[in-house]
Image (cartoon, rainbow, N blue to C red):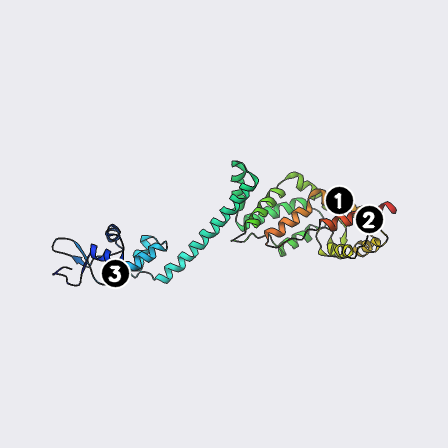
Amino acid sequence: MSDEHPESLTVGQLADRTGVAVRTVRYWSDVGVLTPAGRSAGGYRLYGADAVARLELVRTLRELGLGLEEVSRVVRSETTVAEVAAAHVAAIDARIRALRLSRAVLSTVAKRGSTAEETALMNKLARLSVDERREIIEDFMKEVSQGLDMAPQLAERLERSPLELPDDPTARQVDAWLRLAELIQDEEFRSGMRRMLELSPPRSHGGHIWFTRHVVAVVAEARERGVDPEGPDAAGVLTELFRDADRAEVLEALEAGLDAGAERFRELFLTVRGREPRSHTEDHEWLRRALRAESQGA
């Protein structure tokens, strides 16, 4: 200690008490986050006893990732630690979300063995905003259903259950979104879905064969009971679903959906929304066999 300042600490003494390197103490003093109480006769910086606590605070804030400007504002009492901490929590959360998204994209790239061009496209698709993702889906739905009787119904369903990739998506959700975005921008897929909807799609209790749970629920129940799709009991199932609708038209619409990849679209859509999709492939195949058998027997 100095005789002129008996309660003061030199840079070396302050460093010893806190375990902070001398050069770090000097640097923090130079940038203004640790202000000396005065100087010795020889011009050396001296610090008051309260500098120990202040230095501990500065070190803690720096270890937590705060910038020197923010640290300086805290020690000057221009803001509180709590306020700065809250801001950093938000920033860290955003960074974590960004890192998880990057990890999910890279994981997909690694699995697919993607090229540089594909990687760039996937990264762009993954980082689209909520509005941009919604616009892609709405553009697809508009193109495949515009002018058709069921267009308002599909638009209403999309409005009630929009496609939303969460801020903190899983790798599986990101991968599903990438695959879905690629799928719905494929012209062949769009054409197939349009054809499916143009075939005067049959309705069952107000829903389209591809867009109602009732159809697959009834078929699944029939399968569980062991109903043979080509046997006599299958007729009752078809009547319950489609009443007096032309079975050939129903079959045509079903097969158009199967050919287009409607089931894949549905599964990806649900996965992006965080739901675990149940495959309806066996239900649709049962239904196809039953419709074919009845149409051929008519």
Quadrant of the image containing the N terminus: bottom left
Residue corresponding to mark 3: 52
Is residue 53 shown above or below 245? Answer: below
Please state if 240 lies on the left or on the right of 97 as rendered.
right
Q: Position of residue 284 (x, y in %)?
A: 74, 49
- Return the disc, 2 or 1, that comes first in the chain's sequence: 2
Three-letter amino acid code of the residue under disc 1? Glu
Front one among 42 and 158: 42
Specify the amino acid type for callout 3: Val
Viewer-closest of 149 and 28: 28
Can residue 146 be seen? no
The circle drawn on residue 247 is 2
Depth check: give the residue in front, 176 or 195: 176
The kind of secondary structure element at disc 2 is: helix
| Left or right side of 22 for 91 | right
The numbered disc on residue 293 is none
Secondary structure under tag 1 reads: helix
Q: CA distance from mark 3 to mark 1?
A: 77 Å
Q: Which mark is residue 255?
A: 1
Q: Closer to us: mark 3 or mark 2? A: 3
